Image (cartoon, helix red, strand yellow):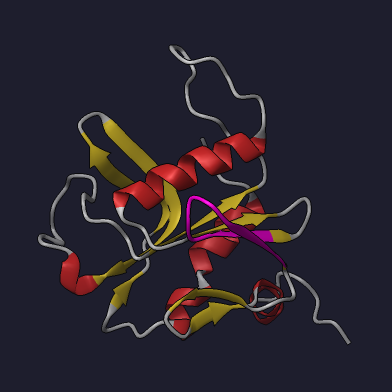
């Protein structure tokens, strides 16, 4: 499925990869980066932060089977998985909890869900707790790295700067 304009520009410009993280230490693939969790267990994520030293073969044409350090999902309309064998859960939150759990089990240290309708960021770093931030708040991702979505969107001229 194609991306919305917001999704395209946020993921494509990915301010995080340009200014927040050291380029020599991290790669920041965007636009549905494939992750191979286990046998027949694949996921795609919008933005993944990968530690370069942990990737065995950066020229591989297979899905990445090394857990990213952090994942960012930019979702206007959350699309649940194919429920051909399991009944649908019926809510976006169920999808967020389920996919976050899979990513945490895989070894990802955290997931940020950017929700455009409510202008919130849901931060998931454990199976037990979620934190909710407004776009104008600083969101910690890992170590001393963080981002403020409002600032990113203003600097990229996607949203007007607040006076």
Q: Which residues are magenta?
A: 121-133
Q: Is residue 33 visible from the viewing direction of this image?
A: no
In this view, the residue in front, 135 or 12, is 135
Which residue occupies 65% across, 37% down? 92
Instruction: Please state if 130 lies on the left or on the right of 62 as rendered.
Output: right
Identity of the residue drawn at 80% across and 81% down: 161
Q: In the picture shown, does residue 43 fall above or below 155?
A: above
Quadrant of the image containing the C terminus? bottom right
Q: Position of residue 15 (x, y in %)?
A: 52, 75
Q: Magenta includes 31?
A: no
Task: Identify the residue at horizontal 48%, vertical 47% (top origin).
Answer: 100
Which quadrant of the view contains residue 95?
A: top right
**Percent from the top left, x then y, of residue 152?**
63, 77
Vertically, is 66 above or below 153?
A: above
Q: Which residue is found at the position 22% from the left and 37% from the top?
A: 38
Q: Residue furthest right?
A: 163
| Residue 70 visible at all | yes
- Dominant secondary structure, magenta: strand
Query: Looking at this rendering, what residue extends furthest in the left direction?
Result: 57
């Amino acid at each position: 499925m194609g991306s919305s304009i917001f999704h395209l520009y946020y993921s494509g410009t990915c301010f995080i990869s340009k200014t927040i993280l050291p380029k020599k230490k991290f790669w920041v693939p965007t636009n549905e980066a494939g992750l191979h969790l286990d046998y027949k267990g694949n996921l795609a994520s919008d933005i993944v932060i990968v530690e370069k030293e942990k990737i065995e073969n950066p020229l591989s044409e297979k899905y990445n089977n090394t857990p990213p350090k952090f994942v960012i999902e930019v979702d206007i309309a959350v699309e649940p998985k194919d429920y051909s064998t399991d009944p649908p859960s019926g809510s976006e939150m169920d999808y967020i909890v389920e996919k976050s759990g899979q990513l945490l089990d895989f070894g990802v240290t955290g997931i940020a869900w950017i929700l455009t309708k409510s202008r919130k960021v849901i931060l998931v770093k454990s199976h037990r707790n979620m934190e909710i931030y407004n776009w104008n708040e600083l969101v910690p991702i890992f170590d001393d790295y963080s981002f403020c979505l409002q600032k990113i969107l203003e600097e990229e001229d996607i949203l007007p700067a607040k006076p």
